Amino acid sequence: MDAYELIARNAEELVTEEEVRELAESPEGRRAYVGYEPSGVLHIGHMLAANKLIDLQETGFEVVVLLADVHAYLNDKGTFEEIRETAERMKEQFLAYGLDEDRTEFVLGSDYQLDDDYALDLHELELETTLNRAQRAMAEIQSGETAKVSHVVYPLMQALDIEYLDLDLAIGGLDQRKVHMLMREELPSLGYDARPCIHTPIIADLTTGEGKMSSSAGVTISMEDGTEEIEEKVESAFCPPTRDPEGDKENPVLEIFQYHVFPRFETVVVERPEEYGGNLEYDDYESLADDLESGELHPADAKGALATYLDELIEPGRRKLAELEAED
């Protein structure tokens, strides 16, 4: 797999493909980032973005993880002291999950977002951006809450972060698309270059296959989950024997295989008793999805394998969380 294929693997959207191809021609030393409010425990959404960061590191990219303490403060997530303690825990979990420590820089927003130059640029962006435009950018992230002034400033800061962190590429879920489009439209008005973006998919709700999996509503998978919890959650997951369910549904079991398991494991073995045909071995996602579609792979066997591989991915982070708890 060449650099471009690895960079673009499992991306929902490249903005733009031409710009990403140009980066792939000389990826060594390029800088990509993802930003998160410190929220405590990594869940499957964080891990999906981390998988993409690991892909990028394999091509030679340096990775920046912004632990956005100022954003979290604006979103009423606690005091700065509380938020920074949470940020440190998240840093340890990202590294336990598999990010290369030598190629990963962790940055607090307060390291630069409170400086005079940043504040002046932010005010200039406020002058350039209409209220409606800022609200549209924040709408998908805001999740229907009553808009506050801080919510409008929030996406403008995200746009500026991409300049102040000296980045070549921005990574985010598809729900970050409007923020990134605001960045591409507005940064040039300050004399800064717009950057390309990669948007990762949103995994469907685990139990229904509709909407998106969320830590605030429904069932999600996180580094807090033990082996039995993972097995129970995956066993109850929506998994029809098809990659294309009817209506506005997706197959979340297949999505997790595609976006989480196959990027991290060269071979996936589905264990079955000999009386049911014995073990199945897959080197790629498409083969597994085809077998589910044809009936060769039963959904229950697929779920059993998924729980095993998810547990292996999560175990180092779960162990790190236990160590941090023991230190408190």
Image (cartoon, helix red, strand yellow):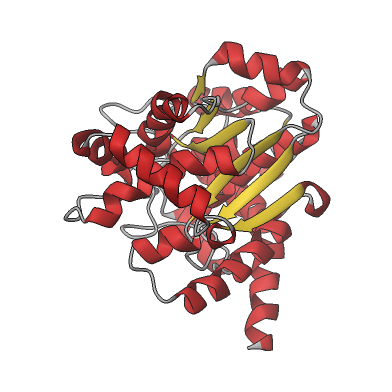
Please say if 321 is above or below 93: below
Name the residue at the left extreme.
Answer: 146
Q: Residue at x 57, y 67 (%)?
A: 87
Residue at 55% of width from left, 26% of height from top? 195
Between 210 and 45, the residue placed more toward the observer is 45
Residue at 39 percent of width and 59 percent of height: 215
Q: Nearer the viewer, residue 147 or 41?
A: 147
Q: Is residue 103 left or right of residue 304?
A: right
x%, y% of residue 28?
81, 29
In the image, residue 117 lies at what x, y percent? Answer: 51, 48
Relative placement, left or right, of 247 versus 101 is left
| Residue 211: quarter of image | top left
Q: Residue furthest top?
A: 18
- Looking at the image, residue 304 sits to the left or right of residue 201; the answer is right
State the quadrant of the N terminus: top right
Residue 278 x, y percent position in the rendering:
71, 39
